Amino acid sequence: METTLHSLYLGFSVALQPANAWYAFLGCLVGTLVGVLPGIGPLAGISILLPVTFGLNATQAIIMLAGIYYGSQYGGSTTSILMRIPGEASSVMTCIDGYAMAKKGRAGAALCIAAVGSWIGGTFGVLVLTVVAPPLATIAVRFGPPEYTALLVLGLIFLAYMSSSSLIRTLLMACLGLLLGMIGIDNMTGHFRYSFDLAELGDGIGIVPVAVGLFGLGEILATPSADAVKEIISPRLRDLLPTRKEWSESALPITRGTVLGFIIGIIPGSAHVISSFLSYAIERRVSKHPEQFGKGAVAGVAGPETANNAASTGAFVPLLALGIPTSPITAVLIGALMIHGVSVGPTLVNEHPDVFWGFVASMYVGNIMLLLLNLPLVSLFVTVLRIPYAYLYPMIIMFCIIGVYEVNNSIVDVWIMLIMGVLGYALRKFDFDPAPLVLGLVISPILEQSLRQSLIMSNGNYLIFFSRPISLGLMAVSIGLLALAAYAFILNRADWRTKLAKVEAGEAET
Amino acid sequence: MTLRADHVAGAFFIGVGLLIIALSGDLPTGTLSMPGSGFMPKIVAGLTIFFGLVLALRANESKVFATLSWSDAKHAALVVAITAAAIALFERLGFLTVNVLMIFALLAVIERRRLVPAAIYSVAVAVTTYVLFVYVLKTPLEPGPFGF
């Protein structure tokens, strides 16, 4: 514990250096804007701004990019509550009760509860990360290929199981992502795969063009400007404080959301999205007045908003301790560190303590900055929303092109982004969520390599995954989840995920 | 039989799986104890075909294909066409010229905005971004024949 406190002191001495604090502030501000603006989520935002960090050192780069990530979780609540437009996917659940509260004249209170809940969730996440990540990194050194394979398989199955849309759809998206991840040179044999003699495809398809295309451009293609005009409810500053009753109604949902979000965040998958959906379902189930959900229940805002921030922080645990990306966003963050010559993994704590602890400490600072930013400046962010969408989206397309091109100075990447944009548009038409595709792309090289290494180690014996304690435990959880999903699927029974999807659909229409 | 959205989606994924298997012909599958470069792609392609088949077989739960709304398709096609033109010219004309033209085209052609405000906005946004990236953030952008 003493070592941790000493290391944290080192972290604060790094994070509070004026230049680093400035980049944390800049990241939080840009992140909030990214969250506020519909059509540009945290993944597209981070990808687009990645080239901007090339001139910074590794610590500043990761501090700024992480600030964008958790800042966007804060910002996403603003459009959800004031316009009923989720600024990004994890804010979908906040739309339901947040907008209903705004309609009742409680927009300020909803924003305040969302911001405070986000702060508590985020700060708790950082506290646990501080304590858990270093010892986990020590254990992670003992992780071999079978453990990595089992963990990644669990991540994919968990994502599919938790998805409120459809197991098959999620698995199909993940398969497509895995296939895209296999384009390029095979690391183990040197064979070129599906690169069609294009030298640029030799290194494979990058995450940035795919993510920006699917989420940035795809969203723009599916949103004609005529459809983007929405009524904005503008809160007054003096109405920001919730009443005593609203505070007491939000206390337990915030507590539950914090713990739930962090635990889900650790597991690979689109953690922040899943956590907010699950938190909403739990709050509704435990509430004494479930009939108030959809009509402005405070718990419907406090729980999901807290959970998605706690999950955002929780997602950093496997990133920093194991060096594996658990979401497309953390994959881009790994890419950013690698560009600066820092390899992420169990050795990060010892090899780059200034980066590790500086980053952890910056999250404490960033969460306070976000709380201070989001409440007083809410009117300013609302002003941004008044820019006509017709003027906004050409600018977003320009940033998409810059963001993708600047990573490798490759025009092929920009063409890939355009193709992915069209694919993203088509996927939306057929009710597919593109997030598992990006996750599949991210984990594809690690999964393939660890699976093949495991088989080589065991001389082709699949039982290797069941003969080592950690991988056995992970595989058992995967099989359990698959069995549960298959049970509902074969009997065609509506389990809690299907029911939740129907509730969301029903309430979205009202 | 009524054609449904998931029939089309399922067929698409089956097609993708078959295409991958066809393209993997020259990639060695190897053995279980020494998997080759075609090992994993063939497994995932097989899974894609299987899941695509399940999707198509359970298509009755999905929307009728003819009822899917394509009202935004014209907007999407125009945005794609203008963006594609901008990408094609990006390395020849450079960041500034291409983005001024692209933003102007998006505003004038798709959004039917008045030409003068659209032109002023296009120039202002592209120049501000150029200055921000090149001089403030020190991130060079693709230069054109005139050096910017």
Image: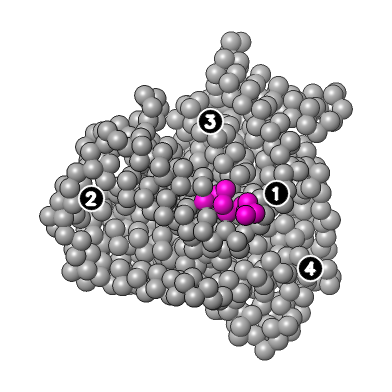
**Mark 4 or 3, which is nearer the eye?**
4
Distance CA(mark 2)–CA(mark 3): 32 Å
- Pointer 3: what residue? A414
Give me the chain letter of mark 4.
A
Compared across the picture, whether A450 is left or right of A326 comes to: left
**Mark 1 or 3, which is nearer the eye?**
1
Q: Which residues are magenta?
A: B1-10
- Please, which residue is most extreme toward the bottom here? A288
Give me the chain letter of mark 2.
A
Query: Which kind of residue does numbered mark 3 sit on?
Result: Val
- Pointer 1: what residue? B66
Work out whether B97 lies above or below A268: above
Looking at the rendered structure, whether the residues under marks 1 and 3 are on a common chain is answered as: no
* Within-10-Å neighbours for mark 3: few <14, some 14–19, many 20+: many
Compared across the picture, whether A356 is left or right of A427 comes to: left
Work out whether A497 lies above or below A81: below
The image quarter in which residue A303 lies: bottom right
Distance CA(mark 4)–CA(mark 2): 50 Å
Residue A302 in view (yes/no) = yes
- Pointer 2: what residue? A452
Query: Which kind of residue does numbered mark 1 sit on?
Result: Ala
Compared across the picture, whether A395 is left or right of A160 comes to: right
**Mark 2 or 1, which is nearer the eye?**
1
Secondary structure, magenta segment, majority class: helix
Q: Please report contact status of discs 2 and 1: CB closer than 8 Å, yes or no.
A: no
* Nearest to the observer: residue A38 or residue B52: B52
* Nearest to the observer: residue A473 or residue A76: A473
